[in-house]
Amino acid sequence: MSTSKLRLPRISLGSLSPAKGSQHKQKRVGRGQGSGYGQTAGRGMNGQKSRSGAGIKPGFEGGQTPITKLFPKKGFVNQNDKTWAPVNLDRIQHWIDQGRLTSSPEKPITARELFLSGCIHDVHDGVKILGDGAQFFHSKIYITPSRASKSAIKAIEALGGQVVCKYYNPLALRDCVKGRTDRTEAAPTRRQDIMWYNNYRNRGYLSPELLRSLGDLPFVEDRWRSLAGQLSKWRKQDFDRPKKKTSS
């Protein structure tokens, strides 16, 4: 018979079937010895692993002292520790001389400019300005890092510049690097951070003295003044409350 006269079966929903070996029957255990998985249901003889309930946790060594307890421990992990990206003043000056960094009251230097220009390679938990190489620094800059050393603040302000240390949580720091401005930046919540950024000696952005000295500079945000005002009211609330009279 020629191939032209062969009649292939008509394909329909009634003639479709799964491929051979693609489906298997469910393994049913504990349903008698005739199934092959009765009596112990495939768990073998009685023992620790054959019991239902709590299993064996990772690191369990049958009851003997595990190796994790035999080794001595030293030190601890500080959950509040910060890793700063250090930047020296001479490096900033070198980047300015090359034209890779610019600063103005309308657009101060932030972690975004330092990262995109290659001045730093990782922002970590924030940028800290250090005073090394201050003798080579001769530019008037406006910069808003997370931290700044006392020598760096003195060198920058001696040339008419301004340093404002600003708090960044991980999300706010990522938004700063990405240039995203549609979300409200987080404010410090830990008491230690609140008091640090409220101190004028640290040039914290919540310091009323610093905000008064900045005046109407374009990069000063209204949110900074609002947070500083709320913090001042919170610190003075104990003095505003009427004192209770004590009975003699």
Image (cartoon, grey):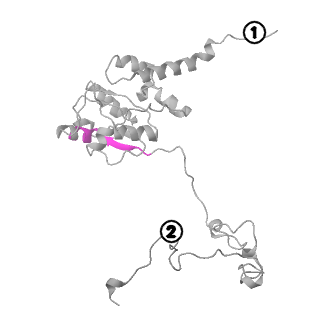
Q: In the image, 94: left or right of 77?
A: left
The image quarter containing residue 58 is bottom right
Q: 54 or 176, which lies in front?
A: 54
> In percent of the image, x 57 and y 20: which residue is there?
234
The residue wearing badge 1 is 245
Query: How much space separates mark 1 and mark 2, taking CA atoms?
Result: 91 Å
Q: Residues within 10 Å of mark 2 (few under 14, many from 20)?
A: few
| Rendering coords of residue 40 (x, y %) | 76, 80
**Residue on which the image places disc 2:** 13
Quadrant showing the C terminus: top right
Which numbered disc flags the more N-terminal residue, 1 or 2?
A: 2
Whether the magenta-drawn stretch holds residue 208 is answered as no
User: Which residue range is magenta in the image?
Assistant: 83-94
Farthest left residue?
A: 98
Q: Is residue 243 above or below residue 34?
A: above
Mark 1 residue crowding within 10 angstroms, few (<14) / some (14–19) / many (20+): few
Give residue 180's position: percent from left, percent from top. 36, 36
Q: Are marks 1 and 2 in contact (CB under 8 Å)?
A: no
Residue at 35%, 84% in the rendered image: 5
Looking at the rendered structure, the kind of residue marked 1 is Lys
Q: Position of residue 210 (x, y in %)?
A: 40, 21
Amino acid type indicated by mark 2: Leu
